[in-house]
Image (cartoon, helix red, strand yellow):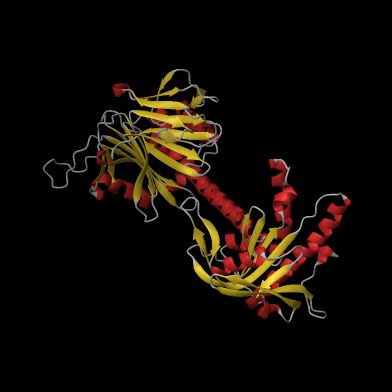
Amino acid sequence: MAKLYIFTKKGRSEYNLVDHNVIGRHPKNRIKIFEAGISKVHCLIASEAEQGFSIRDLGSRNGTYVNDTRIKGKTYLKDGDDIRMGSTRCLFREEMEVRKIKWIEEDEEAIKRQILHKVPPEQLNKFFPQTNIIDEEMLRADYERLRISFELQRDIGFDLHVDFILGRVLDRAFEVLDFDQGVVLLLDPEGEFAVHAYKTKDLDKELTISSTLADLVADDGQGVVLMNPNHSASREAPDFIETPVKATLAVPIRDEHELQGVIILNRWAAYNPYSENDLNLLSNVANKTAMFIRNSQIAKSVTRESLDRERFRRLLSPEMAEMAVAGQLPVDMDGRQHNATLLMANIIDFKTLTDGLAADALIAFLNGHFERLIDRVFHHEGMVDKCMGDRLLAVWGVPRSHEDDPFRAVTAAVEMQKMMEAINEQRQKEEQPLLEIGIGVATGTVVAGSIGARRTRQYAILGDTVNTVQAVCASARSEQVLICEKTFKAVRKQFDIDEAHTLQMRDGAVKCFEIIGAQEGRPQQPWSYLG
């Protein structure tokens, strides 16, 4: 079975390759990659019977690259080939079917009797001091370690995809150690070994993996060389296991923090055992592998944290966003009821105001407008639910609540209107049409949680209170801040308020009240930038 692993900014995807695989942006392609640098019909990967799979560019604008070389005409693919289209990286793998992977249990003491060489952890990957170099062979050994380290670093660079890294590791190991089957096992979260990369000369033979040997190397932390590992002296013995393996190299993948896995290389020729120098070379590869895996984990963690931070900063103030990323401010994505206060601000006569604006000018105008409003929301520790064309919806009480959330919301609304006064004074001087907004504030129960498909979920606010704030906002005139009755009861001692009108809604009447201003002598949040 052949697979194509595709690595994009959104993560990794994989496809089982069939006889005919067209790749590109067109929705009818078998493999669709939606990236600007990729043509609608970019390239074709096709099965060529006994010759394996080939790849051919289909006249794409930016070309198709295999192992960083732009292809011309048909190119045959090998296991582990790196394919690039635009900025998208792909990995071609000739994978064994699961039925061809055979795990075996063996006699641990019998394995130990077959050990020719072993190197304890404290001696692994050490270079010889100059004074200890007594012959050309020792110097060659050090050179090989340096060469492999350099070439691995060059091949892998800053790639973050572990399976790609491990495939390259086995390719480099094969060049200097020559094996018939090689496998990289990594520990899963449950502490069990799983195959993450392999390389074999014969796809028809089973990939035989000794779980006993893997556990022994992992527990002892020592690299070992085994000779003729058929681990019973007699074919008649009940624990005798027939395998084609005649020589084995096995080393742990470990950094200073923890064990990550094991590399096992097998040969089928009894006359060609591995040497102690081979063991040192593979140990060097394993140590490099451990470093690459750790760097990948760190980079993914940083990337994930960065994405979380970016996501929360769209919703929360910078301070609250950092708290959410650090886990100090739980954001319940499953959906839960909250008592909250909602604010909606709407541009009045938006179509007339923006008529004739080019698309880029319109976007710039809206971005500048929302930036000013959102600043007031964040200043009073509210959350931005969404920007909808000419409207902004913000909420207090989710995910962080305060005893004075209604007061915070109304204060933010008043500040927004005062800010608009200053903006319109300037627009009037420039003979521009006035930018007028109406604001509604409503308090009540909402449901907050993650909504949408798995890959497109967004944190959202739902419930009757959303309908209420929409209706209140829609009835607000220019420069008005209208509030519902529940909000009125919560802030009537802090603000001068007049009764405005009553809205007839499907679930009953909603009384609206107008904020006139702050009551004299009441402590208020400073409107510092307003003067």
The N terminus: image quadrant? top left
Q: Quadrant of residue 346?
A: bottom right
Q: Which of these two is toward me, 270 or 64?
A: 64
- In this view, the residue farthest toward the front is 504
Q: Relative to 420, does residue 272 appear above or below in the rendering? A: above
Left or right of 469 on screen, residue 414: right
Q: Quadrant of residue 4?
A: top left
Residue 474 in view: yes
Q: Position of residue 236 (x, y in %)?
A: 11, 43
The C terminus: image quadrant? bottom right
Residue 149 in view: no
Q: Relative to 264, does residue 474 appear above or below in the rendering? A: below
Q: Position of residue 80 (x, y in %)?
A: 41, 31
- In this view, the residue farthest toward the top is 73
Q: Relative to 456, does residue 89 appear above or below in the rendering? A: above
Left or right of 258 on screen, residue 354: right
- In this view, the residue farthest toward the left is 236
Q: Position of residue 39 (x, y in %)?
A: 51, 29
Q: Which of these two is toward me, 367 or 88?
A: 367
Q: Position of residue 437 (x, y in %)?
A: 73, 60
Q: Residue at x 24, y 48 (%)?
A: 105
Left or right of 248 on screen, residue 308: right
The number of callouts visible is: 0
Q: Residue at x 34, y 52 (%)?
A: 192
Q: Quadrant of residue 524?
A: bottom right
